[in-house]
Image: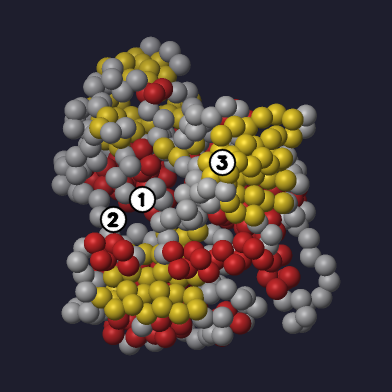
Amino acid sequence: MSKTYDVIVIGSGIAATTVAMRVSAAGRSVAVTDFRPYGGTCALRGCDPKKMLIGGTSAADHARRMHGKGIAGEVRIDWRELLEFKRGVTDPVPEEKEKSFSESGIATFHGRARFVGPNAVEIDGDTLEASHIVLATGAEPMKLGIPGEEYLIDNEGFLEMENLPRRIVLVGGGYIAAEFSHIAARAGAEVTILQHGERMLKGFDPDLVGWLMEKYKEIGVTLHTGTEVKRIGKTGDGFRVTAAGDGGSRTLEADLVVHAAGRKPDFEPLDLKTGGVELRDGKLALNEYLQSTSNPAVYAAGDTAQMGPPLTPVTSHDGNVVAANLLEGNHSTPNYTGVPSVAFTLPPLARVGLNESEAHEQGLKFRTRCDRTPGWFSTRQQAESVSGYKVLVEEESGQILGAHLLGPHADEVINAFTLAVRHGLTADQLKDTIFAYPTGASDIPSML
């Protein structure tokens, strides 16, 4: 059976929802399809469920830091109860999302979509045709190409664990490894990270990452950098991980091994060739309007487009760009200036704008303010021991080029710096701002 729409959106996450809702509200006919439960990675398998688990572990961590400071008694994390707390928020999402689509007049389909022509896809026997097709399928864990790879669980598996294993090995050193290790260690697991690169969180300032590493030692996380996993083997109820690095080879026993080594879009099921959609260096070949350069009927947004940082706010931004171009013709282009990024470790690590090496590469003249701040009130009030900042200010204009924060409230305070970076505010303008006190943001003038 064949059906025709103005726009077909493949995916049901933030980018897909933004496009579908805006285009439908403008009176166009829209169909959405996803082979997974509706909601996308952020709501079901990433940001939101992760933050729910962090809510519990951070509460326990704060209580432990306050021992001897007015808080007494043993604090422990009940993993199953924490998981149920998380599910209370995430489990209703697919039904609520589909209901929202239906109430907006959007046709919903379930199943993998594959191109059967430049303007048509097939979904479980149904052929859908449209003037435009939007690819917003997100990203999947990258293939590592090692023996025993099938024994790895991904972020989705970790967030659905009924029980917390005693020994956990995380393969990788980005957001997933950084955040999941803090969750698992504070919940009582023995955690080891095997990172191929020379340090973790390579997208963040190296000095602040170094300070954060003190926290990893404090909570008992073992980190091996410059280490490549060679093999994963099954051993009864557990696993044996073989790795090699500068210090030679090592073997670790684990009850769980987690894939935390990066994600990228999975284009193979889409049959892009049949749709006339070309790839360039493994990425969709797109123009500045997020439109396919080989098939003008096709647009992409979010992680699928791979044009901006792989972050949830970017997917929403891309969705608005694509929707505007579908409705009014190509005129809107994405602006990725000043996109903040946060690693929700405990304490959190955040950045926006340029780091020092990027500023030097651009030939900019700037001054840097950098310090550790364990003595600041905002840190002491949280009974935290690790905090600090680094801020880059352009010499001639006084504009904020970049900000890098570590410590309590960093995930919120970074938004004030984001406003400055994105809209060209100066250090003097921020210093002249009266912030509520005592709050994390009231530290900003002292950083400038």
Which residue type does callout 3 highlight? Ala
Residue ID at (33%, 77%): 368
Percent x, y of residue 113? 40, 23
Mark 2–mark 1 CB contact (< 8 Å): yes
How far apart in space, not on screen, are marks 3 and 2 (Cα)?
38 Å
N-terminal-most mark, 3 or 2: 3
Percent x, y of residue 120? 30, 20
Specify whether 294 is left or right of 166. Answer: left
Kindly identify which numbered label has been placed on residue 406: none
Residue ID at (39%, 53%): 313
How far apart in space, not on screen, are marks 2 and 1 (Cα)?
8 Å
Disc 1 marks which residue? 309
Number of residues whose C-alpha sits closer than 10 Å to that of mark 1, classed few (under 14), some (14–19) or many (20 or more)? some
Residue ID at (21%, 49%): 333
Specify whether 360 is left or right of 331. Answer: right
Specify whether 411 is left or right of 447. Answer: right
Disc 2 marks which residue? 336
Which residue type does callout 2 highlight? Tyr
Disc 3 marks which residue? 244
Element under disc 3? strand
Looking at the rendered image, the quarter that the N terminus falls into is top left
Considering only vertical position in the picture, is 129 above or below 160? above
220 and 335: which is toward the camera: 220
Which residue type does callout 1 highlight? Pro
58 and 150: which is toward the camera: 150
N-terminal-most mark, 1 or 3: 3
Number of residues whose C-alpha sits closer than 10 Å to that of mark 3, classed few (under 14), some (14–19) or many (20 or more)? some
